[in-house]
Image (spheres, rainbow, N blue to C red):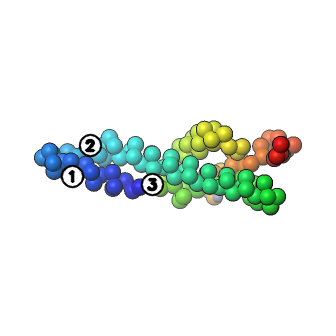
Amino acid sequence: MEVFQYYKPLILLSKQYNIPHEIIRIIFDNYLKKNIILNIQINSISEKINNQYNFIIYDKINNKRCHDGINIHLHDIPYASDNIEKYRNIIDKTINNKKHILYFSHYCCNNKGIMYKFNNPLNRNHHFLLS
Ligand SMILES: [Zn+2]
């Protein structure tokens, strides 16, 4: 959902209760917009991670050669700022919550992207096992 779609119901509400638009806009810009954007970003990031992760698992189960990791780039994230660390935190939390077997590998594309590997780069003996 776009940020503006959250704004529309507030405009309707302001008409209904005769609240000046300007006040609604100030409340929206200063208090609501930041959280709405963050929620949109979290949802978008977790959807992208889950999709890529499901492809990896599918390929592993079917013994297909596949990419051994996932990546997220700033241009994949709606309303993204240049603060790549912020998005790494969101990705780390998503991976932890979903218990995905993914390990941070490195920043790519001039710090505009993040790579995670399926195998822990620190443990080369870790392999995917179906048991
Ligand atoms: Zn990249």
Left/right placement of residue 48 relative to residue 9 reads right
Q: Position of residue 35 (x, y in %)?
A: 40, 43
- Residue type of the residue flagged with mark 1: Leu
- Tell me the element at label 2: helix
Residue holding disc 1: 12
For the point 56% across and 48% down, which residue is it? 46
Q: Mark 2 = which residue? A: 27
* Image depth: mark 3 or mark 1 in front: 1
Q: Tell me the kind of residue under disc 2.
A: Ile
Q: CA distance from mark 3 to mark 1?
A: 25 Å
Q: Helix or strand or loop: what does disc 3 sit on?
A: loop
Q: Residue at 47% of width from left, 56% of height from top?
A: 78
- Extreme-left residue of the structure: 18
Ligand 1, image quadrant it occupies: bottom right
Q: Mark 3 = which residue?
A: 79
Residue at 67% across, 53% down: 54
Depth order, front residue of 35/17: 17
Q: Position of residue 111 (x, y in %)?
A: 61, 53
Instruction: Say which of marks 2 and 1 sits in front.
Output: 1
Q: Is disc 1 surrounded by few (<14), some (14 to 19) or many (20+) residues within 10 Å?
A: few
First in sequence: mark 3 vs mark 1: 1
Of labels 2 and 1, earlier in sequence is 1
- The spot of residue 53 in percent (x, y) is 67, 52
